[in-house]
Image (cartoon, rainbow, N blue to C red):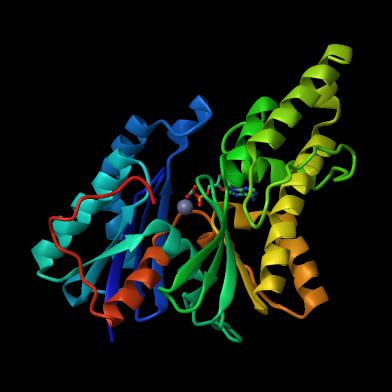
Amino acid sequence: MSLILAIESSCDDTSAAVLRNNCLLSNVIASQAVHRQFGGVVPELASRAHQQNIVPTVDAAIRNAGIDKRDLDAVAFTRGPGLLGSLLVGVSFAKSFAQALDIPLIEVNHLQAHVLSHFISRQIEGEQFPKFPFMCLLVSGGHTQILLLRSHFDIEVIGNTIDDAAGEAIDKAAKIMDLGYPGGPIIDKLAKDGNPEAFHFATPNIPGYNYSFSGIKTSFLYFLRDRLKEDPDFIENNKADLCASIQNCIVGFLLKKLEKAALAHRVNQVAIAGGVSANSRLRDELTRIGQKHGWHVFLPPIQFCTDNAAMVGIAGYYKYLRGEFADISLPPYTRS
Ligand code: KG4
Ligand code: ZN
């Protein structure tokens, strides 16, 4: 039996969660609107906002869970990868909190946490968890990886991006069209009224299960530059079709490799995780492909797609079971 407080502060979301064993009791996320006006995360502003948010967020998580902080058994925290100034706030807070309560610390890798979010129990009927081995496409603003999990902590990287991440490419496409930040959810919404086959953008020929997104971004930029010369209102007049087409291009590319990797590794449990896994087309298309092959497909609940502390808590729980505790002197790390 364990009661774990989890803290996430790797980028621009301050989040705290409480888990009893694998069951989620609370998950509070304070997002930072301050970055929108700059069209991307400003690291200095992110760390300042974390400073402001961390105490009320942890306080709310403990209150919502209906527990007493003195009953906590451990504090799990995201050690990295992420922005240094952001990580430092969560890491320092976790250390002082654990020390004050005289309970152990558990360090968590942010990417592993995204993937393990599939094991969070919300105590709802018919809940199912992936069985090992399973394959997971991790798609976020910073990462695009195909992972093969043989156990919670035996994770093999099958494919990786050689340049930009999928989320980064979607956000850049949105920026080119001046749609706002973060672009992923905006493109997803606008695409619902568009034709995904209206425009075609070439995907690069990268060997194996690796990805590359910088070429797609450039071809989108050049395509628009040419069209805007003929029609200055081209973006405005074709917004939904442009969103649907670029989304279709990126999702199609992501799933083509995932499908190939899952078939080659003979897995029938396939999952997606990370911010981009909230994308409705990615979810629908993976469901369709999964039905074709008889796979068991796992789509994370939307609240666990983008950054959150519940996923840090579940990764922390499995480490707790293994007695893997962190030393108070551990520094954060920025790269995976
Ligand atoms: O996992 P996450 O919250 O942060 C990182 O660890 O990077 O992912 C953020 C990314 C952003 O690029 C954002 O645009 C994208 O996830 N995203 C989406 C959607 N919701 C968030 N992309 C496409 N469709 C969505 N619905
Ligand atoms: Zn993330």
Question: Is residue 271 shown above or below 88?
Answer: below
Front residue of this view, candidates 281 and 210: 210
Question: Taking 272 as reference, is 280 left or right?
Answer: right
Front residue of this view, candidates 7 and 58: 7
Q: Position of residue 41 (x, y in %)?
A: 45, 34
- The residue that appears at 57% across and 38% down in the rendered structure is 182
- The residue that appears at 72% across and 65% down in the rendered structure is 260
- The residue that appears at 40% across and 44% down in the rendered structure is 11
Question: Is residue 120 shown above or below 81?
Answer: below
The total number of labels drawn is 0
- The residue that appears at 46% across and 32% down in the rendered structure is 35
Front residue of this view, candidates 58 and 73: 73
Q: Is residue 178 visible?
A: no
Q: Residue 286 occupies which quadrant of the picture? A: bottom right
Question: Taking 192 as reference, is 314 left or right?
Answer: left
Question: Taking 183 as reference, is 108 left or right?
Answer: left
Q: Residue 105 occupies which quadrant of the picture? A: bottom left
Question: Taking 158 as reference, is 84 left or right?
Answer: left
Q: Position of residue 168 (x, y in %)?
A: 57, 40
Q: Position of residue 320 (x, y in %)?
A: 27, 77
Question: Is residue 12 shown above or below 78?
Answer: above
Question: Is residue 25 shown above or below 272?
Answer: below
Q: Position of residue 145 (x, y in %)?
A: 56, 56
Q: Residue 209 occupies which quadrant of the picture? A: bottom right
Q: Residue furthest front?
A: 207
Q: Is residue 211 visible?
A: yes
What quarter of the picture does the N terminus occupy?
bottom left
